[in-house]
Image (cartoon, helix red, strand yellow):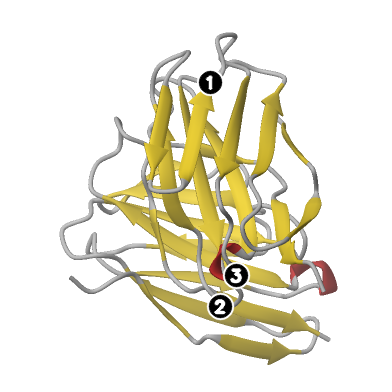
C-alpha cells in the first residue's frame, strides 16, 4: 500500500529558529495536507496543497507540493514555543473520496 | 460552531472484554471517519461513512471491530473482544463532503488501554 515517510522523525527547536521537515511517498498524490497534533488532541489542519509546484503560506508556515507529486515540505519560520507538537503530512489521491494516508509524523520539541 | 465530540476520552479494559466509542460529528457534515492511532504513528483509517452508508472499511478488522452510523449523524465503534494490540487512540473525524478539499476535522480521540 501507499506509504508516507516523514523526516526527521524528531527535532529540537530554539525560539526564533527556522525549521524544515519533509514528506516523501512511493506513490503520486493529488492533494497534500499538513496537520499538527497537540498532546491529548486530534490533528488540526495547517495547510492544504492541491497543485504540483504549489507554494502556500499560513502565517509563519510555508508548504510546497513537489513537482513529482511524490513529496512535500513544511517550513516554520521564527519558531515559538507553541510550535511544539507532532506534524503529520497526509496525501490524498484523486477520487479516493477524501481518503487520507498519513505519514508517521515529525515530533518538534524545545531545546532544553 | 461545535467541533467533533467523542466519548469517553479514556478507557481501560482487560483483553477479551468489549468496548464502544461514540462520536458526534460537526453538524451538517455528511462524511465521518474512524481512525486508529497507535503511539508514535500517524492515524490509520479504519472506516469511512457517507451519510449512513459505508464508503471504505477495507482496513477494519471485521472479526472484532464493527461500526455503525444508523441515522447518518453520530456513530459508534465497537471492539469485541479486545486484544492487547488494540491499545491506541481512536480518532473520529468529519468532513462536509466526500470529495474535493481533503480537509477533515478531528475530535480529541478516545485513548484505549487494553491490559
Instruction: Give the residue drawn at x 63%, y 18%.
Output: A70
Quote the CA–CA distance across marks 1 and 3. 32 Å
The chain that hosts pointer 3 is A
Task: Name the side, left or right, on which A94 lies relative to A108.
Answer: left
Q: Is mark 1 on a helix, strand or loop?
A: loop
Same chain for marks 1 and 2? Answer: no
Instruction: Give the residue drawn at x 23%, y 74%.
Output: B2
Residue for badge 2 = B110
Asked if the residue at tag 2 contacts the one at tag 1, i.e. Cβ–Cβ closer than 8 Å, the answer is no
Residue for badge 3 = A81
Task: Decide which of A62, B40 is in the foreground and name it.
Answer: A62
Task: Name the side, left or right, on which B30 lies relative to A13.
Answer: left
Residue A111: image location, x then y, percent:
79, 67
Instruction: Give the residue drawn at x 60%, y 82%.
Output: B19
Task: Name the side, left or right, on which B34 lies relative to B83.
Answer: left
The chain that hosts pointer 2 is B
Asked if the residue at tag 3 contacts the one at tag 2, i.e. Cβ–Cβ closer than 8 Å, the answer is no
The chain that hosts pointer 1 is A
Amino acid at each position: 500500500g501507499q506509504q508516507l515517510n516523514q523526516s526527521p522523525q524528531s527535532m529540537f527547536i530554539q525560539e526564533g529558529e527556522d525549521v524544515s521537515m519533509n514528506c516523501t511517498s512511493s506513490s503520486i498524490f493529488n492533494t497534500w495536507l499538513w496537520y499538527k497534533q497537540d498532546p491529548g488532541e486530534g490533528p488540526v489542519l495547517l495547510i492544504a496543497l492541491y497543485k504540483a509546484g504549489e507554494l502556500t503560506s499560513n502565517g509563519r508556515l510555508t508548504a510546497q507540493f513537489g513537482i513529482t507529486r511524490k513529496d512535500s515540505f513544511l517550513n516554520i519560520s521564527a519558531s515559538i514555543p507553541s510550535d511544539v507538537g507532532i506534524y503529520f503530512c497526509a496525501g490524498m489521491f484523486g477520487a479516493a473520496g477524501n481518503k487520507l494516508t498519513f505519514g508517521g509524523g515529525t515530533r518538534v520539541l524545545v531545546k532544553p | 460552531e461545535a467541533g467533533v465530540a467523542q466519548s469517553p476520552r479514556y478507557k481501560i479494559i482487560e483483553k477479551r472484554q468489549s468496548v464502544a466509542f461514540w462520536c458526534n460529528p460537526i453538524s451538517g457534515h455528511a462524511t465521518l471517519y474512524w481512525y486508529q492511532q497507535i503511539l508514535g504513528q500517524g492515524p490509520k483509517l479504519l472506516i469511512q461513512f457517507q451519510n449512513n452508508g459505508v464508503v471504505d472499511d477495507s482496513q477494519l478488522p471485521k472479526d472484532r471491530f464493527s461500526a455503525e452510523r444508523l441515522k447518518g449523524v453520530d456513530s459508534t465503534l465497537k471492539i469485541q473482544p479486545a486484544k492487547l494490540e488494540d491499545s491506541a487512540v481512536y480518532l473520529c473525524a468529519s468532513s462536509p463532503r466526500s470529495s474535493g478539499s481533503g480537509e477533515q476535522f478531528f475530535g480529541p480521540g478516545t485513548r484505549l488501554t487494553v491490559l
